[in-house]
């Protein structure tokens, strides 16, 4: 029975370590992403105050090129191109409410696509950051919640993945992709619980 405090302390320490690791991963991913977004091209230092229509054309041109690269399986270059499109999204100014909505919709789509590219590249920390940005654009985006849950599942953070699925399923109860991922997550949660139970039994006799 004396093992009980040790077990609780070990569990707490493990949780704190995981949290710290996640913070470090996020910092590294953000730095890596900034480097990719820069891509060493002069266009990224474009400080011109272009009219809304012209700037949006540049954004959409980058997005279209990124989509083509993605379709060809060139995920690294697609990610860089999505990041470039997003860098242009930060250069709009004096937007009307309608224009702001249009920019937000485009940004949401870009963040989701960039997250998907990072998932394909197995850069899960970067993908996680993009999903967070997508959810800042629209907290009720089922696709963003699903994508983040996918990332969390792949990172073996099953409880967190389950929370995202809870929210997404309330918004889209009939979504087949959500149901499929839910089955996978629950299977792993059950495995994890059985493992913890066995470990506790071993420690407590």
Image (cartoon, helix red, strand yellow):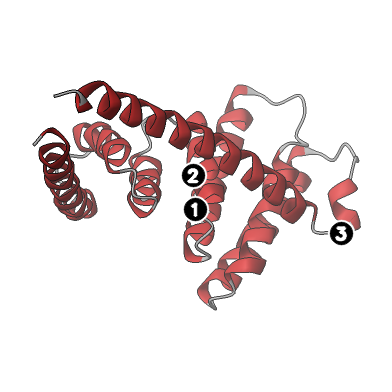
In the displayed structure, 52 sits above or below 59; it is above
| Total numbered badges shown on the rendered structure | 3
On the image, the x and y values in percent for residue 205 come to: 8, 37
Farthest-out residue, front: 2
**Mark 2 Cα within 10 Å, few/some/many (few <14, many 20+)?**
many
Residue shown at 47% from the left, 34% from the top: 17
Residue shown at 35% from the left, 51% from the top: 150
Q: Nearer the viewer, residue 21 or 166?
A: 21
For marks 2 and 1, give the CA distance. Answer: 6 Å
**Residue 186 visible:** yes
Label annotation for residue 175: none
Residue under pointer 1: 124
Mark 3, mark 1: which one is toward the viewer?
Answer: 1
Q: Is mark 2 on a helix, strand or loop?
A: helix
Q: In which quarter of the image is residue 171?
A: top left
Residue under pointer 3: 41
Q: What element carries label 1?
A: helix
Q: Which of marks 3 and 1 is nearer the N terminus?
A: 3
Please report contact status of discs 2 and 1: CB closer than 8 Å, yes or no. Answer: yes
For marks 3 and 2, give the CA distance. Answer: 26 Å
Please report contact status of discs 3 and 1: CB closer than 8 Å, yes or no. Answer: no
Mark 3, mark 2: which one is toward the viewer?
Answer: 2
In the displayed structure, 66 sits above or below 101; it is below
For marks 3 and 1, give the CA distance. Answer: 25 Å
Q: Earlier in the sequence, mark 3 or mark 2?
A: 3
Q: Is residue 78 left or right of residue 36?
A: left
**Mark 3 Cα within 10 Å, few/some/many (few <14, many 20+)?**
few
Residue under pointer 2: 128
Q: In this view, does 34 lie to the left or right of 49?
A: left
């Amino acid at each position: 029975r004396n093992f009980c405090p040790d077990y609780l302390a070990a569990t707490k320490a493990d949780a704190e370590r995981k949290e710290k690791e996640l913070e470090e991963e996020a910092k590294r991913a953000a730095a890596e992403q900034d480097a990719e977004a820069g891509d060493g091209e002069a266009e990224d230092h474009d400080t011109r105050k272009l009219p809304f229509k012209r700037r949006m054309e540049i954004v959409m041109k980058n997005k279209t090129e990124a989509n083509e690269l993605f379709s060809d399986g060139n995920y690294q270059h697609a990610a860089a191109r999505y990041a470039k499109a997003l860098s242009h999204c930060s250069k709009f100014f004096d937007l009307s409410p309608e224009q702001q909505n249009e920019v937000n919709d485009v940004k949401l789509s870009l963040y989701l696509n960039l997250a998907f590219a990072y998932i394909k590249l197995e850069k899960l920390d970067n993908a996680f950051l993009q999903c967070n940005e997508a959810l800042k654009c629209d907290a009720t985006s089922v696709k963003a919640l699903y994508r983040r849950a996918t990332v969390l599942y792949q990172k073996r953070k099953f409880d967190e993945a389950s929370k995202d699925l809870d929210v997404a399923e309330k918004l889209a109860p009939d979504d087949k992709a959500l149901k499929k991922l839910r089955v996978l997550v629950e299977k792993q949660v059950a495995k994890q619980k059985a493992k913890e139970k066995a470990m506790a039994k071993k420690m407590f006799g």
